[in-house]
Amino acid sequence: MPSTPRHTRMSAALVVLTLSTLLGLQPITTDLYLSALPVLTQDLGASMAQAQLTLTALLLAFGASQLVWGPVSDRFGRRPVLLVGMVAYLLASVASALSPSMDLLIVWRTLQGVAMGAGVMCARAIVRDLYAPAQGATVMSKGLSGLGVIACLAAPVGGALTSAWSWHAALLALAVFGGAALALIAWRFEETLAHKDPRALQPRRMLRTWWLILRNAQFVAFSALSMASYGGLFTFLAASSFVYIRVLGFSTTQYGLTMFLNSFVYLLGTFACRRLVARFGVRRSVAIAGLFSLVGGASMLLLAWSGVVAGWAIMLPMAFFIFAHGIHQPCGQSGAVAPFPQAAGAASALNGFLMMLAAFATGQWLGTHMDGTVLPLATGMCFWSTLLALSAWTLVHRYGPVR
């Protein structure tokens, strides 16, 4: 069990609640409106490529903004960055829900991604602020378990709101979550950064810090792991609503329930992560999860090539991948930041940026390859799961900590 966190009077439970809320910004912002995406596209008279841009632009802004938020948080602390970020998230969520055109929706979703970057980046940095590296993966897995609960609720709630009212209601729900996150930070969160770096924003210092981080073998190994894992997840997020609803004929409610099952399996994966790391250490845990990932991605593509077009042919392979995702992400995110106690914000930012770069590239590819079949989804999942397994079995095996 992790000890009481350092450098703060906050309880361990409050720290986990804060992490869950901040990390939960990502799945709720992406998953909750997925059920509404086909309806939204039709209502605003937009193309599928434009609809994909509401997701890819958000994630590119999310990744790029972390490169700024990270050094800023190392200079001024996590709390000021979180307050600014959550206010911006709340405003962007309201504006997104009221957007009269796809172009404006893309603009506001981009700002939402910038604001989301502040929350998720700080969450990773907070773990390094308060816990030693050996405890980081365990604490992160608890925060990501909370993320899993939020993800379980996001898609079904989004589907229900879209069916009962409209896509506007689904996007407005994000403002409610953003308001709750802002209240938690404003009233309960205490600064976790013990020593602010007054030179963190100097350009030469920033470039030197980023170069040192990128040269670190452990950072590269665990960033490759988290990139490939998130690349696979994003492939599914970006393509699944069109595949399930338009290709397989699922209703928005049925699609929401399918996403709930995925999130529940992911939640089980985060629980398994804590057991596996305690028993086998990080390297072996990641290697075991890599096998699950590869089975999921490869079987999905084989079924698609065989002409099997059915819900189970996507759901079952995805269950293997998403279970492993619940192991890879806590280990990957904490492992990438662990070597940099004095630059946790910058390391967290680079790790997040690389994940979102993979997601953006995936979104661009899907936008031009979605052809009304399950094959693009299955191909993307197999590609990322193969890279994920290779990263786990080579880079992490060589450079990752044993425990």
Image (cartoon, rainbow, N blue to C red):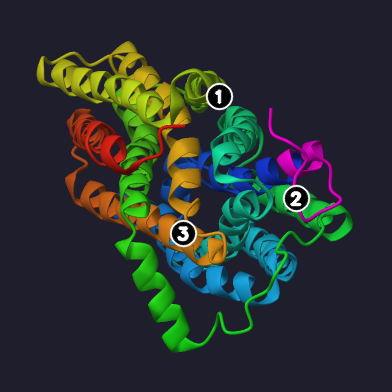
Residue flagged by tag 3: what amino acid is it? Leu
Q: Residue 58: which numbered mark, if any? A: 3
The x, y position of residue 136, in whole percent, is 58, 41
Residue shown at 40% from the left, 62% from the top: 60
Residue flagged by tag 2: what amino acid is it? Arg
Closer to us: 200 or 355: 200
The residues bearing labels 3 and 2 have C-alpha atoms spaced at a distance of 34 Å
Can I make out residue 5 in this image?
yes
Q: What stretch is highlighted in magenta?
A: 1-16
The residues bearing labels 1 and 3 have C-alpha atoms spaced at a distance of 31 Å
The x, y position of residue 71, in whole percent, is 55, 73
> Could you tell me which quadrant the N terminus lies in?
top right
Residue flagged by tag 1: what amino acid is it? Arg
Badge 2 density bin: few <14, some 14–19, many ≥20, Cα 10 Å = some
User: Residue 352 falls in which quadrant of the image?
Assistant: bottom left
On whether residue 9 falls in the magenta region, the answer is yes
Q: In the visual, does 51 lie left or right of 113?
A: left
User: Residue 117 falls in which quadrant of the image?
Assistant: bottom right
The residues bearing labels 1 and 2 have C-alpha atoms spaced at a distance of 21 Å
Which element type, helix, strand or loop, lies under badge 3? helix
The x, y position of residue 188, in whole percent, is 86, 53
Front tag of 1 and 3: 1
Q: Mark 2 — residue?
A: 6
